[in-house]
Image (cartoon, grey):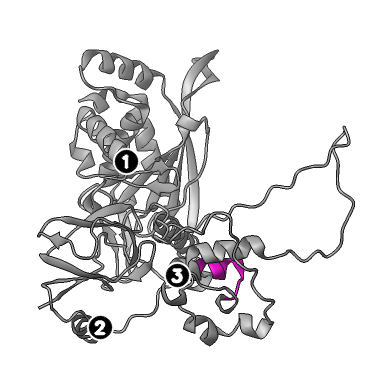
């Protein structure tokens, strides 16, 4: 009997996904545990292993297609199995789900609360559908001029056979699918058809103003805008940051910390402990974890019935990617040494940039640290991740002129800003946390034990 493979939940905040790349093709024999696809989630692109075995009877989902959780993506079985009957049975058993749009989420839907988890987002831009390329030397016919009524006739648009990628691209460019000739199987409109229609659509000049020229009389060259499709990561970042803006009453506290002694001890530590190169960020994570242990209200979440002070301290630290960011987590952070945290952070950061983190390595944070000091940023404020009580934003360690014991001198100093959810953390509580953090970093010997 044929088995329907469904889109799995690969993270606790995942609501939809994209088949970024198939690792199999129809007719292949699949074993249990074999990687059959790469699935783009709200956090990363992950390999999906088959739970079943059998011959690939049908690939239901196209590469680049946005799908809701539980949607059929493939059918496995034996030769002669009824594929359509298996899909019909799966659709009958599954609860009705709303159609998933590849459009950017609207503000009204972005405000919907999401499950509590580490932010992030981001993942890779969905791979383009495997569509035949246009014939070299030929150009698709220009689309016919279409009335406004036809542009808004959703029924007519939905009846045009088109790939999901082509449908999304046409919608983004404002082109009606009814005006685009399809070159795919059975007249199906594919991505290349839409791209050709975009190139051949004449612009409508409103007027022809005099060309602007530079000081040498040469005309300026206009550069076209670039449209970058939303990745699952970017959609999730947008959704959760808007949720934070709308549902979290932020306030901000900033403190300046003398890092002179910490800088010196860090250098001595890296020389003495072979195989370890502790960074300022590692020191900061250790100090933050121990400060949270002494200030449990900052390590807390707001729920409808109560404020939950978490027993475990799970530190998230933001890692920038080319198209977004992810937040790996360090569990039991207050119980780990500087050496342990330094090694773990280095390994997690490396795999984050390679997009190889497992779901459990990106979820469950109770407090997040964001450090932009390596970019020369002196001070900034971060947005609280929904489900956490606060986030710490850290700037660069920089030399500053300060008065010490009545004399002007130069010391290495750092600014740290705590963004708080006022539903959870009050001003005095946040201030006490920052004072504890400053004490750990200005008297840093305790961090090295």
Packing grade of label 2 (10 A; few <14, some 14-19, many >=20) is: some
Q: Which residue is drawn at 79% across and 42% down?
A: 220
Q: Can the viewer see residue 134?
A: yes
Q: Nearer the viewer, residue 68 or 320?
A: 68
Q: Distance between the residues labelled 1 and 2?
A: 36 Å
- For image coordinates 38% across by 67% down, the residue present is 66
Provide residue 337's location: percent of width, then percent of height. 20, 31
- Counting residues from the start of the chain, the first of labels 1 and 2 encountered is 2
Residue at image mark 2: 91
Which mark is drawn over residue 354?
1
Q: What element carries label 2?
A: helix
Q: Main secondary structure of the magenta part?
A: helix
Q: What stretch is highlighted in magenta?
A: 168-176
Query: Does residue 105 appear anywhere in the picture?
Result: no
Residue labelled with disc 3:
184
Q: Distance between the residues labelled 3 and 1?
A: 35 Å
| Label 3 – label 2 distance at C-alpha | 27 Å
User: Which residue is more in the foreground, 413 or 318?
Assistant: 318
Residue at the (86%, 48%) spot, across then down? 211
Would you say residue 38 sits in the magenta stretch? no
């Amino acid at each position: 009997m044929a088995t329907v493979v469904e889109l799995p939940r690969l993270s606790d905040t995942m609501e939809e996904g994209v088949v970024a790349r198939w690792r199999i093709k129809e007719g292949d024999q699949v074993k249990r545990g074999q990687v059959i696809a790469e699935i783009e989630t709200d956090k990363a692109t992950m390999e999906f292993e088959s739970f079943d075995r059998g011959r690939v009877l049908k690939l239901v989902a196209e590469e680049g297609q946005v799908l809701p959780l539980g949607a059929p993506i493939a059918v496995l079985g034996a030769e002669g199995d009824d594929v359509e009957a298996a899909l019909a049975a799966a659709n009958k058993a599954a609860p009705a789900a709303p159609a998933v749009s590849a459009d950017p989420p609207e503000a009204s839907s972005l405000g919907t609360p999401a499950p509590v988890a580490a932010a992030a987002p981001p993942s890779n831009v969905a791979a383009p559908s495997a569509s035949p390329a246009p014939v070299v030397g030929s150009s698709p016919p220009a689309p016919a001029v279409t009335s406004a009524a036809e542009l808004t006739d959703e029924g007519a648009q939905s009846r045009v056979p088109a790939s999901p990628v082509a449908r999304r691209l046409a919608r983004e460019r404002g082109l009606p699918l009814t005006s685009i000739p399809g070159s795919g199987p059975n007249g199906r409109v594919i991505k290349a058809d839409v791209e050709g229609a975009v190139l051949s659509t004449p612009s409508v000049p409103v007027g022809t103003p005099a060309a602007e020229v530079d000081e040498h009389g040469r005309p300026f060259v206009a550069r076209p805008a670039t449209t970058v499709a939303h990745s699952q990561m970017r959609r999730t970042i947008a959704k959760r940051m808007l949720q934070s803006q709308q549902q979290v009453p932020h306030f901000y506290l900033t403190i300046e910390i003398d890092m002179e002694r910490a800088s010196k001890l860090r250098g001595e530590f890296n020389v003495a402990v072979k195989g370890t190169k502790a960074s300022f960020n590692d020191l900061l994570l250790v100090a933050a974890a121990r400060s949270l242990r002494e200030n449990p209200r900052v390590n807390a979440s707001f729920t409808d019935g109560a404020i939950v002070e978490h027993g475990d301290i799970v530190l998230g630290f933001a890692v920038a990617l080319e198209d977004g960011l992810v937040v790996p987590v360090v569990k039991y952070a207050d119980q780990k040494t500087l050496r342990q945290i330094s090694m773990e952070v280095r390994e997690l950061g490396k795999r984050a940039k390679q997009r190889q983190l497992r779901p459990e390595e990106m979820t469950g944070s109770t407090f997040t640290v964001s450090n932009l000091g390596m970019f020369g940023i002196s001070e900034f404020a971060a947005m609280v991740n929904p489900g956490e009580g606060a986030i710490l934003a850290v700037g660069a360690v920089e030399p500053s002129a300060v008065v010490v014991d009545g004399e002007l001198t130069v010391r290495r100093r750092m600014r740290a800003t705590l963004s708080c959810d006022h539903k959870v953390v009050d001003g005095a509580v946040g201030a006490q946390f920052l004072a504890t953090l400053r004490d750990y970093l200005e008297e840093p010997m305790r961090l090295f034990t």
